[in-house]
Amino acid sequence: MQHSILWLFLILAGASIIVFTYVYLSSKKANQSDQGMNQPLKKRFWFLLILFVILGIFASVTIPKSPYYLFADETPARVLHVAAMQYAFILSNDAINPESPQGETDLVLPLNELIEFRVTSLDVNHGFAIYDANNQLIAQTQAMPGYVNRLRWKFTSPGKYNILCLEFCGMDHQGMRSSFTVK
Amino acid sequence: MESLKTRKITSVWIVIVLALFIVAIILGILMRLNQGTIIQQSPVTFYGNMTTHGLTMIGIWFVAGMAAVNYLMERYVKTSYGVNLFALICTIIGVLMLWSSTFIGHFHAGWTFLYPLPFKVAWAQWATPVFLSSLVVLGVGWLVWSVSLMSQILKKYTLSQAFAWQHFKKNPAVETPPFILITMVTLVGVIACLLAAVLLLVLLFAEYFSNGSFVNDAAAKNLTYFFGHTIANEMLYLGLAVIYELFAEVSGRPKWKTTWYVAVAWNLSLAFILTAFFHHLYMDFVQPEGLQIVGQLASYLASLPAAGVTVFSILVAVYRTKINWSLTNLLFFIGVAGWVIGGLGAVIDATISNNFVLHNTLWVPAHFHTYNAMGNVLFSLGFFHWFAHKFDVGFYIDKNAMLKLTLILFGGIGFLLAFYIGGADSIPRRYSNYPPEFTMAAPLATVAAVFATFYLLAILLFFLNITKNV
Amino acid sequence: MYKNNVFYFLVIVIIGWNTSVYSQQDNIAWKEESHVYTKVLDAPLKGYGLGDSTSLLQLAHQNPTILALIFTRCTGICNPFLLQLSEKLEWEIEHKNFNIVVISFDPRDTEADMSALAKRFHLDQEKQWIFGVTDSIESLNKSIDFNPIRDETRQQYDHEALLVGINSDGYITKKLIGMRSTSDLALLVGSIYNSFTPTHQLPNKNRLFSCFNYDPKTGKNTPGLGLLFIALPAILTIFILFTSNYLGKSERIG
């Protein structure tokens, strides 16, 4: 998904550069007698209208895909409790006691079944980001102290998934990680 | 007209901004070199530099915009020299305090100092209060400056004239110059976000001194980004006010006038800009869904007046029109292009379903560096250049104008592409060192550092040329 | 809602920003998260208002269920807890056909004790309410992670006030520990109908400047005191704007 986003961006950015260059060159070539753009107000109106319609379509297509609505009608097959802390993730099948946080290692999650991650933090704000076997970010939520954020996801391909922290949380932010396997 | 004193203090602002810019760029390059494993910094040093880099950049480009607006405002209303000086002193003291907290005290909670991180002290005990106090000093100085400028405007224009409401109808009796309108709209946003910062700091100080924990994390985060997003956005608008004032003038064209659509657009953008910050909290599911959607819609809508009015106006002003091109209006023109491209990256990221896989990856610094380094900075450089040469007698020829532009474009584009590619590769932002599985991360960082060095060279040339002349 | 917030504000200011009032819950709050989406034990039930059903899951299959655990001889939280629950469900939560099953975890309690309890709370005529006992209370406790500790000398239990939401598939959807706000209760009721909310607050962090409160009537979050704080910069800005305008007026005329 990210790569198509990059391409979309590069195409739009390229188009902008072409427009600006073209306009600049038209000014360079212009004579004293040139009158600039014909009917700029009309063109401005059309430009705005087209932009408005494009953005409207974009919004109505993308908003329903927001993570808050992901798999909202289903009951999860598996719950994973996640407690983030400086600088580790604790993952557990059971609720995590903040007094003596204990997690499990070598977690295996089922393929093609709905998993609910219940993510919280025991100290500062952290990020909980799931990376697939190709190191592409596929889903994330923030871990905020005092709140449990519920991230639902279905893993459609087996392999090792990494979890990284995506909210700056201190000096070992970059070393804060965990992983699980999907089979 | 302007006094000699205003001219002098504007020169001081310019020199300070450029000098601090060079330091902050060097910190940025060091960060990229460290990520590229070319040099070895401890994470504490890295994150301390990151904090300094972020806050210094925000600060200098905000004051650069303010100083330019203050200088040009003298054309319409009298401004207060005393307040200008006060802001300058506060800025110097604030930056010194900030730097001592990060460089000496090793404070490294990031420029957003997201609660409760500043209280999880992993640095000198005194660094947290000094860091927070430095923000108070900066915030108070800037707040007084903004309120002073706004009240000066309101001494000449009524409230509705300052917002150009009379332009909603045909043939208004009084004309509001676009410069006044944009400055007014921007100052209101600036005051709101600085007040948010002050409020946040009051809460944080109360917490600090009471050892309590009564600040709600979600409320603190909202305030943080209301302040952070809005100030970063408004400083761009300060640059736009300068463009509205100067672009036609330096191009040898008739001065731009406020039309009904300019008036409507800028009034609307005030509403959008104050609600767009919600897009920083998309991944905080605690935020009500309604506000998340408001965030996406406001971010989208904010682009309409910007693109449909300001950008389009620049294009209309240039298209097939004979213009006296100089470094100043070239910088303005290229800056607007950079702003547009950064804005595209921003709108993409302000889409919740995209943010789900882009949030806090390198995509984020990619887009905001685009409209800062290739947008806002160029607006201010354009002003600096114009200011430095406006008192020249006769024509001057800037011998290395093309060299500077080439370096900026070459260095800037290369540096930014590394960020965008990194973002598309899901590489996290704010990592002092990259995990080994991101094989492209370190090479991209190194390449970015090399390109940024070219950008730095251009800024050094600007610094030499401009400081010689002011 | 607003009055409530002002009240909380004053209370908390008076006690000097001391959060110790919540600290008793600190250690147990996380237990709300335990056993979520596991199946509750199909405990056989005897008691008042059961109809044809003979077990907890049979009830749940008919209608989603909220399970409350108490004992009739309780001198502590049970009575106020039950009173608050019945009042909130009666007046503040949207009426739906879910069951509220009140079960005693004290083996001394009989069907008659529970029936008397129902009468005392005037709930004996309410179709939603079921009061009963089970002979497999220990297994039931285990299946919902509820651990009352018997104090032999006082003949009492040291226990938390627990509500368990059970959907019609018999799965635990949410738990609430302690006397809780209407909004938390509404989340519990929503959960048994499988309505998904992407977040919830843990009770021990009930801090002063909470941004949003869950509104049970609309099922949405509503602005709380914290949001007022976020709006404060905007309000102050408008104030400054009009003050400057007012001050500027004299100079404009002159």
Image: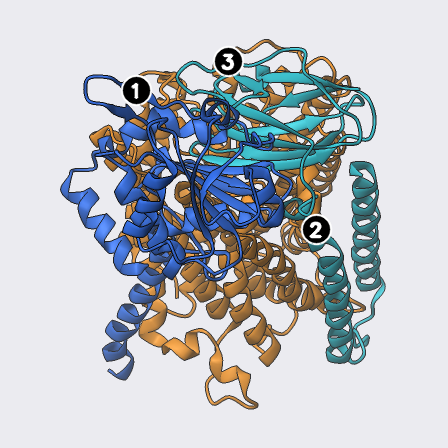
Q: Are marks 1 and 3 on the same chain?
A: no
> What mark, if any, has residue A102 been given in the picture?
3
Q: Is residue A66 left or right of residue A168?
A: right
Residue B462 visible in this rendered orientation of the protein: no
Q: Where does residue A146 sit, x and y in percent of width and height? A: 42, 34
Task: Give whichever of B162, B213 is nearer the camera.
Answer: B213
* Drawing shade for chain C: blue
Q: Where does residue B8 sit, x and y in percent of width and height? A: 38, 48
Mark 1 or mark 3, whichever is nearer to me: 1
* Drawing shade for chain B: orange
Task: Give whichever of B130, A181 is nearer the camera.
Answer: A181
> What mark, if any, has residue B21 been given in the picture?
none
The residue at 61%/47% (across/down) is C194
Mark 3 falls within which chain? A
Residue beneath label 1, please? C150
- Residue A116, picture quadrant: top right
Tell me: residue C13, above or below residue C36. below
Residue beneath label 2, please? B334
Mark 2 or mark 3, whichever is nearer to me: 3
